[in-house]
Image (cartoon, rainbow, N blue to C red):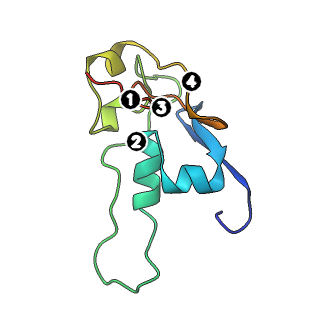
């Protein structure tokens, strides 16, 4: 993906969770799902260790969780994440993230 596109859009549970210029998203992901996806990428160093993974299962589209759709699998989730679906925020021009913590919000 990094070699064939200029912009990246990441979806989870049928919603857009992050989008922006390829370099900005890969260098500084603002949504925890994007960060976890990047961390799961195999290294080119030939490491024999186990690949990181995202615990849990994606939601069934017929039974989506309330709030942020990623919150059941997110290690950064707090009370607002379980109750309120985040609006898109713009941490930098052209870089969108739908996460309550995208702008540095605290619990």
Sequence-wise, which precedes: disc 3 or disc 1?
3
Q: CA gap, disc 3 to disc 1? A: 24 Å
Q: Nearer the viewer, mark 4 or mark 3?
A: 4
What residue did someone put label 4 on?
Answer: 88
- Residue at 34% over, 57% down: 53
- Whether tag 1 and tag 2 are in contact, CB under 8 A, the answer is yes
Foreground tag (1 vs 2): 1
Indicate which disc, 2 or 3, sits on the residue closer to the N terminus.
2
Q: Earlier in the sequence, mark 4 or mark 2?
A: 2
6 relative position to 90: left or right: right
Residue 18 versus residue 24 in the image, above or below: above
Residue 27 placement (x, y as % from top left): 50, 56
Q: Name the residue: 56% across, 49% down.
A: 25
Relative vertical location of residue 29 with respect to residue 103 in this rendering, above or below: below
Mark linked to residue 101: 1
Circle 4: is it few (<14), some (14-19), or many (20+) Cα within 10 Å? some
Earlier sequence position, callout 4 versus callout 1? 4
Residue holding disc 3:
60
Of 12 and 80, the residue lying toward us: 80
Question: For numbered disc 4, what is the local secondary structure?
Answer: loop
Q: Earlier in the sequence, mark 4 or mark 3?
A: 3
The answer to whether marks 4 and 3 mark residues whose Cβ atoms lie closer than 8 Å is no
Indicate the quadrant containing the N terminus: top left, top right, bottom left or bottom right.
Answer: bottom right
Q: CA distance from mark 2 to mark 3?
A: 19 Å
Q: List the single residue furthest toward the top.
A: 83
In which quadrant is the C terminus drawn? top left
Q: Residue 95, how many percent across, how many down? A: 61, 38
Residue 32's tag is: 2
């Amino acid at each position: 993906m990094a070699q064939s596109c200029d912009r990246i859009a990441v979806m989870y549970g049928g919603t857009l969770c992050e989008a922006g210029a390829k370099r900005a998203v890969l260098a500084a992901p603002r949504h925890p799902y994007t960060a976890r996806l990047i961390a799961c990428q195999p290294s080119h160093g030939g490491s024999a260790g186990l690949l990181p993974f995202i615990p849990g299962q994606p939601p069934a589209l017929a039974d989506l969780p309330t709030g942020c759709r990623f919150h059941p699998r997110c290690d950064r989730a707090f009370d607002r994440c379980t109750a309120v679906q985040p609006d898109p925020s713009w941490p930098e021009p052209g870089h969108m993230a739908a996460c309550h913590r995208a702008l540095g919000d605290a619990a």
